[in-house]
Amino acid sequence: MLGKRTDYLCRNYFIVVKTALISVFYKDGIDELASYLHKQGTTILSTGGTQKYLENLGIPVVPVESKTTYPSILGGRVKTLHPAVFGGILNRSDNETDQAELEQYGIDNIDLIWVDLYPFDETVAKTNDESEIIEKIDIGGISLIRAAAKNYRDKLILSNKDQAPRLLKHLQSNNGDSTIEFRKQLALEAFQTTTQYDRSISMYFAGHESTPLRYGENPHQEARFAGDLNGVVNQIHGKALSYNNLLDVDAAISLIKDFEVESQSVFGILKHNNACGFAIRPSVTEAYKAALAGDPVSAFGGILVTLSAITKEAAEAMNDLFFEVLIAPSFDEDALPVLRTKKNRILLELQDFDWSSKTVRSALNGKLLQDRDNKIVSRDEFNIVSTTPPSNEQIDDLYFANLLVKHTKSNAIVLAKGNQLLASGTGQTSRVDALNQAIEKAKKFGFDLNGAVMASDAFFPFPDCVEIADNAGIKAVVQPGGSIKDQLSVDYCNEHKMAMVMTGHRHFKH
């Protein structure tokens, strides 16, 4: 037996699905939940193809037009847009006027609304026929979803087929009832669905519809890009950008935009979203050569980025290197013929743009949103905690290394000297491992670490890292601080005449 609502408290925390409206494009998962509802005595309203599908399962269905007294019209554009439907969804169970009006106009309450949306993105991906694309802009469905989500205290809203098994399990576990916490979560997911759907449509009308990519991270994965890529970079040569290219381009631009220097050139080489070479020098050619020296092996197939115009001299210097992408604000006319000798090489002109203030990534069938890490700790903000202060040259290198470590996958260590990345340890489960990786790599490519500096993305819980750095010849360290054992690292620096500064800002990057 279904539970019953007995008082105001129950009405606001549990609801019984007496009537459900089911109208879906995708029929996946409909059989089990619809059969359960039917067995529980739920009256099911439906339309068109969904109605026929349910009837073929032997589930009785009440056509929506029997409630609206209007048939589906305008080629299916108008089916559910009627007070008999929306009144049944938007009424509040504890509002006497709402309930009186339902009775006055003969409107039945609807407890569960199961609606998905026309496949707009899929249609854009497979055709350029504008009339077909326009017809896949859902009106009734998105209105039903929003109405039900708005009234989540009294309604259940399913906005995609993947939610059906969860709802079935929830109802079975609660004797046919649903909790308000569960309904609110479904409402959140509904608004996330409508937000993404509206974004896809607005991007299409703005001319920035999602673009199919060759494949995702691996050839067996399909992938698309949805966004205004032309507002960030203008591609002037080469093959289409891939999924991995776009991730690297994003990382490269994020990094390079933190380095604004006057009268000098900044150059970076990235591989798998991490800098493997980076340098600041008087000219773009010198900066490129210094960056390449940091790791000429990893540079193969990498992403090159600079804030300087690419000269013919620079183009000739880098032309023998196989690289995927070169990003620069401009290219001298005599540099382009040199770079275009490789037909697949991607050349991108960096546009003047502002990053979104938020970053978004998928997680656990949902999304994680956070503020973008825009924090840059200036030299003046460095807190010198050691008795031996850093020299002016070390201060410059510490600033340089701290910016680089901010853009390096955690756990991260960066070693630098003379505005040049000597080596980094990236993505390690131990900070000691990250440091040892960086030291070994620097030595492999012939760098002398005497006088170099070290940057860490997070604090040192023990003095082991500063001791290892000291033994390698590193004499200045920048770290955020914040460990209850900070003083152990400071004491080691004081005993061995090392300089240490703290920034007060951690830069984890996962």
Image: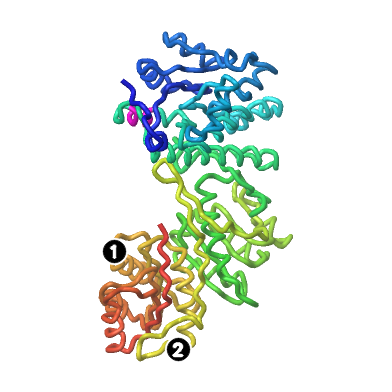
Which three-letter amino acid code belongs to the residue tagged 2? Answer: Ser
Q: How crowded is mark 1: few (under 14 residues within 10 Å), some or many (20 or more)?
A: few
The answer to which of 498 and 72 lies nearer the viewer is 72
244 shown above or below 50: below
**Start-end of magenta stretch:** 165-171
Q: Which residue is drawn at 41% across and 23% down?
A: 29
Res 90 visible: no
Could you tell me residue 498's position as x and y percent?
34, 86
- Describe the element under mark 1 as helix, strand or loop: loop
Which label's residue is closer to the chain start, 1 or 2?
Answer: 2
The quadrant the C terminus occupies is bottom left
The answer to which of 368 and 172 lies nearer the viewer is 172
Could you tell me residue 128's position as x and y percent?
68, 30
The answer to which of 462 and 397 lies nearer the viewer is 462
When asked about the image quadrant of residue 17, the answer is top left
Residue that label 1 marks: 430
Instruction: Tell whether 90 sits left or right of 4.
Output: right
Q: How crowded is mark 2: few (under 14 residues within 10 Å), some or many (20 or more)?
A: few
Residue that label 2 marks: 391
Which three-letter amino acid code belongs to the residue tagged 1? Answer: Ser
- Describe the element under mark 2 as helix, strand or loop: loop
Res 349 visible: yes
